[in-house]
Structure formats: structure tokens, C-alpha cells
Image (tube, helix red, strand yellow):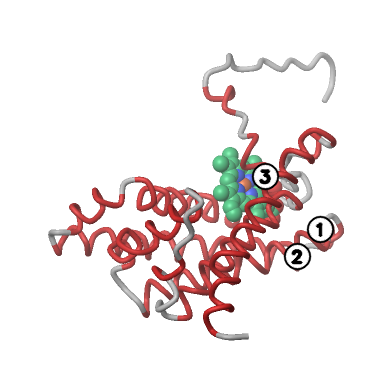
Amino acid sequence: MTQHTFDQFLFVGLPYICLVVFFLMTIYRYRTQSFSYSSLSSQFLENKQHFWAVVPFHYGVLIITAGHLVALFIPRSILAWNSHPLRLFILEVSALAFGFLTLLGMVGLIVRRLGNAKVRAVTVVSDWVLFGLLLVQVVLGVAIAVFHPWGSGWFSASLSPYLWSIFLLRPDPSYVTAMPWLVKWHIILAFVIVGYFPFTRLVHVLVIPNPYLWRKTQVVRWYGKR
Ligand code: HEM
């Protein structure tokens, strides 16, 4: 297999396979097993380590994901923001800090599931595969921030056009084929996680209980001894 064919597979074929699996399976699972759309909380089984793992992980991953989406949707604004070195530096340092927070939370999630017998008992193979993929993805992200800095700039200039070329069905892998391997693996793994998403507990991201933000508080009364 030539390098060209290999790149075509990794940066065109694989992304489309993963996106098609994502859309079809997400809809299929929702229509056939809508009650399985949950993060299946294990808070009742263990609640101390839970807080120190789930909370930092979510603060980290949500802010990092939002950062990727901003660079995807308004890359020119990011480049304009970065035109001043101090602002570029603030963005990079903040992103790295949230990357470390995500990593800390991710390690906490794994240690908790390994260390607590009750939580381990409710952890299935797909959870372990998911945690492994997420851990490697977060480590790659932090490694990229450390070894290939100024990512907010080159993401906006090269990765954003690549991703749009995929979404708009005019795939152009030449934006990414000359990138360092750490970056290439981060892209490949991102698509693999998207394809694996509908088979895992990650589906909870699609059913955030937004009404909790504005619905009336629930009053619970006990009659008699608790
Ligand atoms: C969109 C907003 C999100 C909300 C409201 C949310 C909410 C939750 C909740 C309530 C749990 C259950 C925690 C428990 O009680 O055990 C959970 C678990 C989890 N979430 Fe999220 N989540 C969100 C986004 C994400 C994202 C973007 C990821 C990305 C990778 C993610 C990955 C996970 C994982 C891996 C778990 C399992 C943790 C464990 O139990 O070990 N979540 N999430």
C-alpha cells in the first residue's frame, strides 16, 4: 500500500465510516433502546472518589470540547485573537490547564472503577474500551500542547479547513498529511471515538436534562420515620 493510499484511508475513508456508523447507530439505538440513553450513574455505589473524578473530568472535557468547536466554527476570530502574542499565550496556557484537569479526572475515573469492588462489578467491557480510548486521546492532546505548541493557531489554519472539507463532502487530506504523528493520531482517534460513541455510555451527552435548569424545584416530604 502506498503512502498516498494509506493517507486516503486514514483521513478520508475512516472518517466517513465513523461518521456514518455514528449517525445510523445513534438513531437506531434511540429508536430501539431509548431507555439505555444514560450515563448510568454509579454515585450511589461510591460517592467520595466519584466527586474528585467526575467533576474535574467534566469541567475539563466540556471546556476543551468547546474550544475545539470554537476553532472549528470561527477560525478567523481565533487567528485575529492570536495576533497579539499575550492573548495567544493566555489561550494556550488556559487550554493546557484544562487539558491537565481532564487528564486528572480521567485517571481518577479509571482508578475509582478499578479500586472499588461495587463499581467494578457494574463496569462492562465497553466501558473499559471507552475509558482506554478517552485516556489515550487526552494524553495525546496534552502531549500535542506540550510538544507542538500554538495549536489554537495551526488548528484554525489547517485542521479547521480539513474538517470542513470532510463535512462538506469535498475531502482534502493534504491539510493534515504532513502534520506530526502525535497530531495525526489525535485526529484518527477522534473519529474512532465518534464511531464508537453510539455503542457506549457517551450517548448521555445527547440527552442532557436541560429542563432541570428552569423547572420548579421538587419538594420531597417523608411521613413517619426514615
Ligand atoms: C453535555 C454535558 C454533559 C453532562 C450533563 C454530563 C453528565 C454526566 C453524568 C450525570 C454522569 C454520571 C456521573 C455519575 O453519577 O456516575 C456522567 C458520566 C460520564 N460522562 Fe458525562 N456529561 C456531559 C458530557 C460529557 C462529555 C463531553 C464526555 C466526553 C467524553 C463525557 C464523558 C462521561 C464519562 C466517560 C462518564 C462516566 C464516568 C464514570 O461513571 O466513571 N460526558 N456524565
Q: Quadrant of residue 111?
A: bottom right
Residue at left 62%, top 55%? Answer: 194
**Mark 3: amino acid:** Phe
Element at badge 2?
A: helix
Please, is residue 146 above or below residue 66 in the view?
below
> Which mark's residue is nearer the viewer, 3 or 1?
3
Please, is residue 159 above or below residue 3 in the view?
above
Element at badge 3?
A: helix
Residue farthest to the bottom, as pictured: 2
Residue at left 21%, top 61%? Answer: 88
Q: Earlier in the sequence, mark 1 or mark 2?
A: 1
Q: Do the CB atoms of the residues marked 1 and 2 lie less than 8 Å apart?
A: yes
Q: Quadrant of residue 161?
A: bottom left
Is residue 51 something that shows in the picture? no
Element at badge 1?
A: loop
Q: How many marks?
A: 3
* Residue at the disc numbered 3: 23
Q: Which mark is residue 128?
A: 2
**Mark 2: amino acid:** Trp
**Mark 1: amino acid:** Thr
* Residue at the disc numbered 1: 123
Quarter that holds the C terminus: top right
Q: Do the CB atoms of the residues marked 3 and 1 lie less than 8 Å apart?
A: no
- Horizontal side of residue 137 vs 129, given as left or right: left
Q: Is mark 1 within 8 Å of ligand 1?
A: yes
Q: CA distance from mark 1 to mark 2?
A: 7 Å
- Where residue 81 sits in the image (x, y, percent)? 19, 53
Relative depth, front residue between 147 and 4: 4
Relative depth, front residue between 81 and 171: 171
